[in-house]
Amino acid sequence: MAELAEAELRSQADISGLRNLLRAVAEALALRPFIATRIATAALELARNAVEHGGGGQARLALQPSDQDISLMIEITDQGAGLVEGSASGLSQRQAGKAGLGLGLAGVRQMADRFEMKTGVAGTQATAWFGVKLPMERWDEIASQATSAVQHFLKEQDHPAQQLRQLTAELAERELMVGEVHHRTANNLALVNALISMELRRAQTDEAKEILRNLDLKIRAIARAHAHLQHAEGDVIEAHSYLRQVGNEALALARHDLKLSLHVDAGDIVLPGQLGLDMGMVTGELMTNAFKHAFVGRSAGRIGITLQEEGGTLVYRFSDDGAGLPPDVAPHRSGSLGWRVIRAIASKHSGHLDVDGKAGLAVELRLPAKAWTTTRA
């Protein structure tokens, strides 16, 4: 066995240090990304539980040879009150008080190629082995490379340049994780949309079909926002592309005999993620409203959406060339769900909403600088 390192686990900073140490080992061994991610995920779960639930502890890393493969051994020891054996996973129930390593052990056990645990009133020791898919005939070379990499890593820990590299790597890792969350959320929402589509085909009444179509559009707008956030640099949405996609998807809800042209112009404006999502919701609601009321008895129409900055204020405008509104009708004060959603979004961002129905419908939403300037250069 080749001992690589031991590290204390007392705080979140120690957990970050263990992550960086594992990254150095993975690079030295040229591990496949999937294997490196699996090892880091399991080790950090054990370390996090030791710190948060076990009163702190210690981590030990070593390389261990076997007949066919080389394994990276990760041993985490805490100072908690121990675990009680559970009937389902054997690790599901903890003793009263602080018990270390009691969260996520079932997941770690599944990820590891081999997993052992010793627990008692003095603490818990969890040991996980991971095959690194490297040939035994290169054992001496591999052990030497890993040991040298760890020693070099430990020497550089206090160097300012190394600290900067670590912060940069951690930021990149965080952005990757956030992107994965948005990706999974978008996929889950796509599944919800598929279920709605199934129900839509089974719906018997026009009212039920309309409700399901409107719900489908709302979820699609949210899913689109998460898809944009997945690929964005930070928690931002490029407004023009997003609003155009939401608008094009909404057009599918219009009558089949109604031909509509859609014009979207948001320039190069970039919005905070939540505000971008909300503007997509507003766009979907206004387009749905136009399909219902603006073009009755017509075979064609036009819808325009613009977003621009005016003196530091963000101005969203929606317009159609439809029938407009009678003088005594104020839809933005109605109790319909769509207009309630629009009013709630305007209030949420301290915005001012104005509606004009003299020549078609014109809706203007003005948002103060504080609602969106956090993303401006």
Image (tube, grey):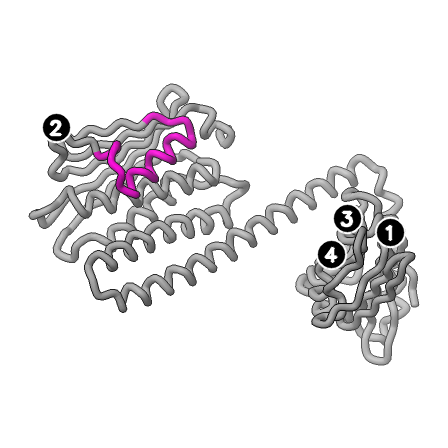
Q: Are marks 1 and 4 in contact (CB under 8 Å)?
A: no
Task: Using the image as rendered, state which of residue 327 and residue 160 is in the foreground.
Answer: 327
C-alpha separation, residue under disc 4 versus residue under disc 3: 11 Å
C-alpha separation, residue under disc 2 versus residue under disc 1: 72 Å
Earlier-in-chain disc, 2 versus 4: 4
Mark 4 closeness class: few <14, some 14–19, many ≥20 residues within 10 Å = some
**What is the span of residues highlighted in magenta in the rendered image?**
331-352
- Expressed as whole percent of the image width and height from the top left, the position of residue 186 reads 46, 55
Earlier-in-chain disc, 3 versus 2: 3
Q: Which mark's residue is nearer the viewer, 3 or 1?
A: 3
Q: Mostly what secondary structure, the magenta segment?
A: helix
What amino acid does circle 2 point to? Answer: Pro
Earlier-in-chain disc, 1 versus 4: 4
Residue 52 marker = 3
User: Would residue 228 appear left or right of 362 to someone viewing this image?
Assistant: right
Circle 3: element type: helix
Res. 355 image quadrant = top left
Task: Using the image as rendered, state which of residue 239 and residue 88 is in the foreground.
Answer: 88
User: Would residue 203 appear left or right of 41 to someone viewing this image?
Assistant: left
- Residue at the image position 51 percent from the left and 50 percent from the top: 230
How many numbered discs?
Answer: 4
Residue designated by label 4: 45
Q: Is residue 188 magenta?
A: no
Residue designated by label 1: 57
Residue designated by label 2: 327
